[in-house]
Amino acid sequence: MARRSSFHPRNTRSLSNASRCAAFAATLWLTAGCASQSAATDHRSAAAAAAGPAPAAAQADDLAVHVPAGTALRASARGDLDGDGDEDALLVIEPTGDSAVATAPRALLLLRRDAGGTFRLAVNSPKAILCRNCGGMSGDPLQAMRTGKGEFTLRFEGGSRELWSSEYRFVYRAQDDAWHLAGIVSRGFDRDDGKNAQRQQGPADFGDVALGAFDPAQFPADALP
């Protein structure tokens, strides 16, 4: 049975929901955002919860073959991304061994199960994940990857005085056997004056954006005026 959501950060600082929510507690949407993040990162089936968390290495064993040389697996999430009833996977891949790594965009790989149950690369989106330093003083902006039947959502957060978050929802389209950007929700909060704003966009605003060509830098989180 396909799991609905799993997000496994690797080799990075701990993302504390408590500290994140404390910084964002001045507005309701930020509190809700932390709850959503917690659900995305901590959700497990009852059986998995009873058995305890699986070691990260064990979770990634069947994904390691898809990590190219010279890169590292930053995070992964599993779910029925194409709605066919089996479990697919998302991998965030980042380069290693270079001083420019912290400012380089990171790739998102989408893997699908073939008839024999083996993961096969379906989409390589080379700029889909913001760089490690793109969150500013907040650190790595990658906060969650939520999966659902035939869809998934990427969530980024960052900022200092002006905090921001962006969620990008992708939906599988059977007509062309591909995933397309279906919606963007951007939020902003000024910690100095308490102003907050939210903006929602759909395909009528940004056009037809296929996952392989997606670059979040083209859709900045500028909800605040």
Image (tube, grey):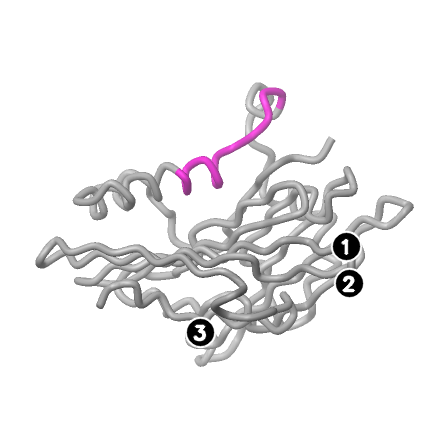
In the rendered image, residue 125, in percent from the top left (x then y), is placed at: 63, 69
Q: Decide: few, some or many residues near mark 1? Use Cα within 10 Å; few <14, some 14-19, many ≥20.
A: few
Q: How far apart are marks 2 and 3 (CA)?
A: 25 Å
Relative to residue 99, is residue 8 drawn left or right?
right
- Identified at 77% across, 54% down, the residue is 174
Residue bearing mark 2: 176
Q: What separation in Å lies between label 1 and label 2 (alpha carbons)? A: 5 Å
Relative image position of residue 88 (x, y in whole percent): 72, 47
Label 3 amino acid?
Ala
Q: Please, what is the three-letter code of the amino acid marked with disc 1?
A: Ala
- Please tell me whether residue 37 belongs to the stretch shown in magenta: yes
What residue appears at the point 77 percent right and 38 percent down from the top-left corner?
85
**What residue is disc 3 on?**
217
- Tell me the quarter of the picture where residue 211 sits: bottom right
Image position, residue 152 (x, y; %): 58, 50
| Residue at x 42%, y 67% (from the top left corner) | 132
Which is more N-terminal, label 3 or label 1? 1
Q: Is residue 181 left or right of residue 167?
A: right
Q: Do labels 2 and 3 touch, CB within 8 Å?
A: no
Q: What stretch is highlighted in magenta?
A: 36-47
- Mark 2 lies on a secondary structure that is loop
The residue pinned by badge 1 equals: 174
Q: Is the magenta stretch mostly helix, strand or loop?
A: helix
Which of the 4 image quadrants contains residue 148? top right
**Disc marking residue 27:** none
- Looking at the image, residue 223 lies above or below residue 59: below
Name the residue at the left extreme. Answer: 193
Q: Which of the marked residues, 2 or 3, is nearer the chain's N terminus?
A: 2
* Amino acid identity at mark 2: Asp
Give the foreground label among 1 and 3.
1
Quarter of image, res 103: bottom left
